[in-house]
Image: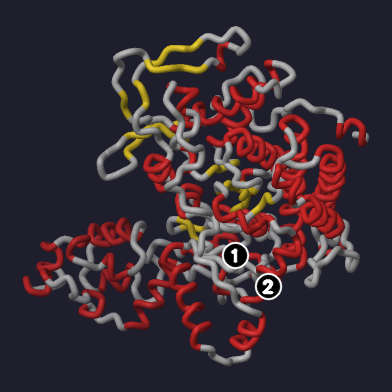
């Protein structure tokens, strides 16, 4: 595409990436109905969502006073499928109970606003945008803080007065009480010198982080050299892209999906007023899971370069989307005020994408550039560079609607709803999911081309065999010698499937009080004592129990795992395996 073609298309136009022509946005998504809280509230939601996601969505995103019946408000200049609705006179209100209704309300409001402003060239363009956004939200390919969704679009869907788009109850993306730590203080602490006030501050920060996940450190000088904008990020609505949902069938990164997701988020945020003083807070999740699935060690040049390429694509596409919106809706006052610093940041980003080593503007700490020699997928690196070429051309031609775009901080409600394995640039905390090997770890094993037997043994080493049939010390033969019959062993095997420790299984609750009294000779006091150690009573010592736990429930790591080289084990490194300086 030529520079003229890039800069001279002023309409809001999207291709189809997440939806199909002549199909409803939810046509390929299976929905289920289930209770989501202690009050047995029922919610219709996509079946691939976790129960935690559904519960968080029900608590935070549903409008509590939706009219049971509505009627359309006809407008001759608006397509009928996009007409506003208002409550039928006398109708009662009730809470929403369908995730699709929420997405329809939010996206419908944005699409209606864009149509009324004349941003679409054709009705088909509007319908594509409407379907792409709804499909992406339902699939969780894009995520908007569910707290912000509760009140968006109530004027369009129900004829109610909408509150501010981003709920005032939403927890900011990066909200901490501001303190400033000088380099001298930090260097002194690293060197072992304890300043009382600084030490107290660090303790407060770490305690807050563990309690709420909302305390963050911002490298103020470095951030300020890139742009003056990040000071406003604290009140921008958090938005997220789940990287695992943007892959091709072979597992490789779907760069087109990333670009589309970013553009949809920027457009929705602008139309719905989810930004704050021209700032956005777009982050991504499951980076470490994606790297693992690709067979790339988190602590490797290829892993870091892949992360850099993905971040470059998202950031560049956000700039480009904002520039297109500026051409349609006008340049923001924030950009006009901070034009030079924002354009300087753009140029520095562009240079980093092209592996520039030294030629940066007003940076005291130079970035690590995107190097194609690092082992990064060349098509991914090329996409990142092309994206920055396009972004600089569009911004030069049209300016920007926004002055900051990305953030690695997340609100507690986004964390709960997204239900990711790892957030932002964090390493994966575990290789397990619900007692079994995480799907991305299993993908990584498949990429290593191990034999079927070797793969099965590595998987069992990590997640366990969930059986005592051939376990060391505490096994079926040993249990039979202790008086266990076939029925008792069957009960043990069944209980192992949901347990995390052998002591949870070897109790009168699972084995039955009659069996414990008649076959194991336990007296009533022992049976009724919840602290009674049946394994110890049977003659198994602590080492026997430890070996049985490892065999049955796994090591949850690749320590001493068979069949893998150290280089292969690096692919499966989790937070506890990594050096602090290895964090991306």
Residue at horizontal 18 percent and vertical 75 percent from the top:
532
Where disc 2 sits, the SS reads loop
From this viewpoint, is residue 444 visible? Answer: no
Q: Give percent across and percent down for residue 126.
A: 66, 21
- Color theme of the render: secondary structure
Left or right: where 489 falls relative to 29: left
Residue denoted by label 1: 427
Question: How packed is label 1: few (under 14 Cα within 10 Å), some, or many (20 or more)?
Answer: many
Q: Out of 55 and 186, give the one closest to the viewer.
A: 186
Question: Could you say which quadrant of the image residue 187 lies in?
Answer: bottom right
Question: Could you say which quadrant of the image residue 77 lies in?
Answer: top right
Residue denoted by label 2: 565
Q: Give percent across and percent down for residue 27.
A: 55, 25
Q: Which of marks 2 and 1 precedes in the sequence?
A: 1
Q: Give percent across and percent down for residue 260.
A: 70, 37
Where, quadrant-wise, is the N terminus in this rendering?
Answer: top right
Q: Mark 1 against mark 2, which lies toward the viewer?
A: 1
Residue that lies at the very extreme toward the left in this rendered image: 524
Left or right: where 456 falls relative to 348: left
Q: Give percent across and percent down for residue 310.
A: 73, 52
Where disc 1 sits, the SS reads loop
Residue at horizontal 59 percent and vertical 22 percent from the top:
112
């Amino acid at each position: 595409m030529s520079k003229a073609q890039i800069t001279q298309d002023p309409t809001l136009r999207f291709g189809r990436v997440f939806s199909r022509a002549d199909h409803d946005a939810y046509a390929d998504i299976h929905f289920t109905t289930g209770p989501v809280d202690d009050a047995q509230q029922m919610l219709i939601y996509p079946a691939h969502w976790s129960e935690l996601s559904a519960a968080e969505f029900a608590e935070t995103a549903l409008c509590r006073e939706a009219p049971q019946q509505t009627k359309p408000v006809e407008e001759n200049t608006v397509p009928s499928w996009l007409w506003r609705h208002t409550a039928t006179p006398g109708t009662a209100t009730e809470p929403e109970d369908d995730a699709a209704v929420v997405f329809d309300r939010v996206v419908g409001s944005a699409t209606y606003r864009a149509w009324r402003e004349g941003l679409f060239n054709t009705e088909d363009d509007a319908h594509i945008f409407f379907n792409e956004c709804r499909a992406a939200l339902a699939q969780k390919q894009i995520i908007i803080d569910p707290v912000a969704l509760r009140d968006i679009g109530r004027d369009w869907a129900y004829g109610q007065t909408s509150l501010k788009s981003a709920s005032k109850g939403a927890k900011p993306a990066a909200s901490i009480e501001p303190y400033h730590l000088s380099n001298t203080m930090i260097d002194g602490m690293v060197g072992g010198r304890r300043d009382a006030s600084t030490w107290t501050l660090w303790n407060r920060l770490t305690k807050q982080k563990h309690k709420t996940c909302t305390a963050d450190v911002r490298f103020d000088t470095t951030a300020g050299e890139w742009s003056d904008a990040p000071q406003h990020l604290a009140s921008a609505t958090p938005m997220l892209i789940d990287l695992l949902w943007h892959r091709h069938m072979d597992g490789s990164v779907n760069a087109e999906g990333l670009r589309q997701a970013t553009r949809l988020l920027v457009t929705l945020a602008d139309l719905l007023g989810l930004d704050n003083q021209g700032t956005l807070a777009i982050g991504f999740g499951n980076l470490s899971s994606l790297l693992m699935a690709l067979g790339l060690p988190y602590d490797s040049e290829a892993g870091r370069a892949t992360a850099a390429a993905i971040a470059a694509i998202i950031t560049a596409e956000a700039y480009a989307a904002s520039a297109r919106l500026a051409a349609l809706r006008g340049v923001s006052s924030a950009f006009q005020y901070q034009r030079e610093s924002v354009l300087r940041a753009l140029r520095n980003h562009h240079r980093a994408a092209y592996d520039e080593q030294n030629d940066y503007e007003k940076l005291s700490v130079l970035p690590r550039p995107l190097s194609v020699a690092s082992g990064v997928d060349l098509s991914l690196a090329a996409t990142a560079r092309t994206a920055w070429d396009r972004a600089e051309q569009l911004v030069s031609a049209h300016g920007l609607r926004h002055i900051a775009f990305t953030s690695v901080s997340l609100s507690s409600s986004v964390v709960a709803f997204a239900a990711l394995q790892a957030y932002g640039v964090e390493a994966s905390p575990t290789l397990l999911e619900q007692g079994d090997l995480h799907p991305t770890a299993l993908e990584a094993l498949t990429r290593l081309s191990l034999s079927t037997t070797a793969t099965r043994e590595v998987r069992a080493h990590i997640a366990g065999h969930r059986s005592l049939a051939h376990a060391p010390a505490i096994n079926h033969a040993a249990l039979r010698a202790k008086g266990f019959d076939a029925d008792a062993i069957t009960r043990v095997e069944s209980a192992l499937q949901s347990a995390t420790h052998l002591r949870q299984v070897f109790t009168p609750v699972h084995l039955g009080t009659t069996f414990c009294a008649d076959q194991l000779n336990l007296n009533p006091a022992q049976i009724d004592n919840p602290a009674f150690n049946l394994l110890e009573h049977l003659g198994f010592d602590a080492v026997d129990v430890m070996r049985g736990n490892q065999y049955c429930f796994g090591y949850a790591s690749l320590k001493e795992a068979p069949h893998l080289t150290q280089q292969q084990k690096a692919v499966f490194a989790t937070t506890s395996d990594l050096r602090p300086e290895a964090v991306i």
